[in-house]
Amino acid sequence: LFNPTSVAVAGAAPGKAGQLFLDSILASGFRGNVYAINPKGAEVSGVRAYTSIGEVPGPVDYLVCCIPAPAVPQLIKDCAAKGVKAISIFTAGFSESGLETGRQLEAEVSRLARATGVRIIGPNCLGVYCPRAALCFATDFPSEPGRVALIGQSGGNTSYLIRAAAHRGVRFSKAISYGNACDVNECDLLEYLAQDSETEVVAAYIEGVRDGRRFYRAIRELSKVKPVLVLKGGYTSVGGEIAASHTGALAGSANVWGSLLEQAGAVQAYSLEEMVDLLVTFALMPHPKGRRAGVFGGGGGASVLATDELARAGFAIPALPLKLREEIAGLFGTTAGMILRNPIDLSMVGYGQGFYNIVKRLLTFDDGDWLDFALVHAGFGQAAWFSASAFEREIELFRDFITRIYGEAEKPLALVLQFLITSWDWQKALDVQRGCSEAGMPVYHSMAGAANAIDKFLRYHERRQAATSQG
């Protein structure tokens, strides 16, 4: 499933979904044979199209199905005769439709999977993304592999999480959009990932399960060896109804789900944005040894709110040691325009050499171990008095200095980068994010998001340590 040597796309036709899958596989640089299947033959995206799977000259390990739902059962039979090992069914119109014909079709697909031994992903899914195998269902996903695995019942949410996390430096070992789960389901995938040496962190978007006991066991055993991040869709009664019409999922009550996930040891997210923050934290953040936080940058009001968010999440905001305050004041000979306390307001210093000198000293001060991790708080889009050219110089300095500081830091360091999408400088702010992410630095878009994610990260490690000490 994750390392096919040959791939076929059934329903590959110009301008249709099948061509998009074919183009994605070709763009990813897949090293094996790639076949297109179209009853009309001809050529699609430069690939010869065969009229049926039986006409394909070589073996096929993995097939993407983009043909109409009523034709899917016969395709599965043909694939079984060909020796195809796995099929992902993009086609919709099965149990999620709410129609009896759709439910019967899905039941037949499940029966054929059991009878033939062909593993079925879906229907109503996007299938497999595996960078090491150069297998992809989108043309813009990163080609570099990472250590995070993602399973998702929704193709759209799976794609969003891959893209959003990738823009902030996260890379994936594999991702699977599995849709209605008529054969391969979340339990199969979680049990596999517990043994997968390529994966260190597992994330899941789930709308419902068919076997709650098995799911609980899978999460519990997986969480003993790897962090498991779970975003449950359909928590509310109305959301559950939508989930049923989306993937045919049995959603269950919020209380049952919350208790199950907590007892199994999962880290819960409650939105896509929170899941991205958690992915960034668990994939990139070194483990702080405690809860003492330093906040550098921002302005006076931002410092007040940062203190509130961190304190609310259970972090300590230690005072700057007297000797350290004296050293920082000595760097400039004055403290005018600066608040020498934690959070330390550096808004009047700018992002040049002075910024670098202060932040580096705050992180390397060794006369007393005063903090466990630090957040650099930078806001763009508010400084309207900057000219465009001056702002560009300032932001380039910041990008260069913050990545340099990160490379030299002896304590965990992350960036809280806030900017207005409606401001003229937001593209420059994204350049900063890109530079920091390429350096491996965790980047957050709000202090609340950073505080929440790092708190859950520490709580996870505290639970693991307690479980280990108890034997």
Image (cartoon, rainbow, N blue to C red):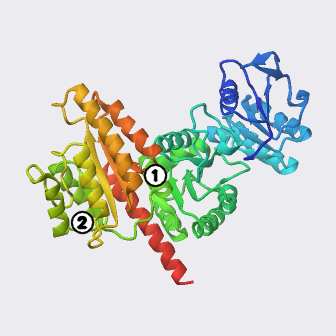
Q: In the image, what residue type sits under mark 1?
A: Val
Provide residue 190's location: percent of width, then percent of height: 65, 58
Asked which secondary structure carries label 2, the reply is loop
Q: Is residue 402 at least partly visible in the picture? A: yes
Q: Position of residue 253 (x, y in %)?
A: 50, 59
Q: How many numbered dots are placed on residues in this image?
A: 2
Identify whether 192 is placed above or below 399.
below
Depth check: 381 or 405 in front?
405
Q: Residue at x 51, y 42 (%)?
A: 166
Please name the residue that numbered disc 1 is placed on. Answer: 280
In the drawing, what numbered circle is on residue 30? none
Residue position for label 2? 317
Tell me which residue sits at (20%, 27%) in the image.
Answer: 387
The local crowd at label 1, few if under 14, some if 14 to 19, many if 20 or more residues have their Cα within 10 Å, is many
Q: Find residue 105 and report its horizontal and vertical position in percent.
A: 75, 39
Residue 54 image-quadrant placement: top right
Residue 252 falls left or right of residue 64: left
Q: Nearer the viewer, residue 27 or 70?
A: 27
Is 81 on the left or on the right of 371, as rendered? Answer: right
Q: Position of residue 93 (x, y in %)?
A: 67, 34
Q: Is residue 272 left or right of residue 103?
A: left
Q: Secondary structure at mark 1?
A: helix
Residue 74 occupies which quadrant of the picture?
top right
In the displayed structure, 165 sits above or below 289; it is above
Question: 104 or 239: nearer the eye?
Answer: 239
- Which image quarter is the C terminus in? bottom right
Disc 2 and disc 1 in contact, CB within 8 angstroms = no
Query: How would you rate the neighbour count of disc 2 (Cα within 10 Å): few for under 14, some for 14-19, many for 20 or more?
Result: some
Instruction: Please name whichever residue, 276 or 120, is drawn nearer the observer in this view of the structure.
Output: 276
